[in-house]
Image: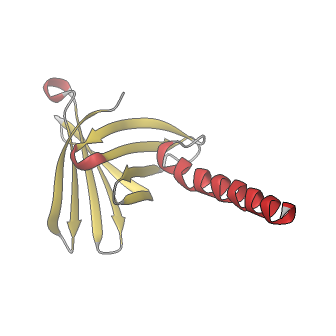
């Protein structure tokens, strides 16, 4: 009985460690600066990071549908917003962060095969 209890405790500890590791990249990255953090409708939390060494843009999101981490993003300055774009197969993720008169506003858009499948209004997180 003691052996079974020890195995259960070890398994629970390993599962907790692995689940913590898998969630952490979506919310933090010690090798990058946080550029934009948004809380969007539908329970989406989106963070855009910029790697210290390479300048690579990273997309990290958590949502009820799951977590997503993407790299190799691009940034475009439209004057009223910073537009961050990321690809994942047939999906494209576009995050708009307002500036100037549009400060405090943002949008998360998802496209599949270049057709919009989701658009969520966002506000600064934190």
| Residue at image coords 18%, 49% | 120
Residue 93 on image: x %, y %: 28, 58
What residue do we see at 86% from left, 60% from top? 2
User: Residue 81's quadrant in the figure?
Assistant: top left
* Relative vertical location of residue 75 with respect to residue 111 in this rendering, above or below: above
Residue 117 image point, x, y percent:
16, 65
From the viewer's side, name the closer residue of 16 and 61: 16
| Residue furthest top as drawn | 101
In the rendered image, the residue lying farthest to the right is 3
User: Image height check: is 87 above or below 124?
Assistant: below
Q: Nearer the viewer, residue 53 or 28?
A: 28
Q: Name which quarter of the figure residue 86 lies in.
A: bottom left
Q: Is residue 55 above or below residue 94?
A: above
- From the viewer's side, name the closer residue of 96 and 68: 68
Coloured how? secondary structure
Image quadrant where one finds the C terminus = top left
Residue 71 shown left or right of residue 42 in the figure? right
């Amino acid at each position: 009985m003691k052996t079974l209890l020890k195995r259960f405790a070890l398994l629970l500890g390993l599962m907790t460690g692995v689940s913590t590791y898998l969630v952490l990249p979506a919310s933090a990255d010690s090798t990058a600066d946080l550029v934009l953090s948004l809380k969007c409708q539908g329970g989406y939390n989106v963070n855009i990071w910029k790697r210290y060494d390479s300048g690579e843009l990273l997309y990290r999101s958590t949502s009820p549908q799951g977590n997503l981490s993407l790299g190799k993003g691009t940034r475009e300055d439209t004057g009223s917003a910073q537009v961050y774009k990321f690809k994942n197969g047939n999906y494209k993720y576009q995050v708009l962060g307002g500036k100037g008169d549009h400060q405090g506003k943002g949008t998360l858009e998802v496209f599949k095969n270049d057709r919009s499948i989701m658009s969520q209004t966002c506000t600064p997180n934190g």
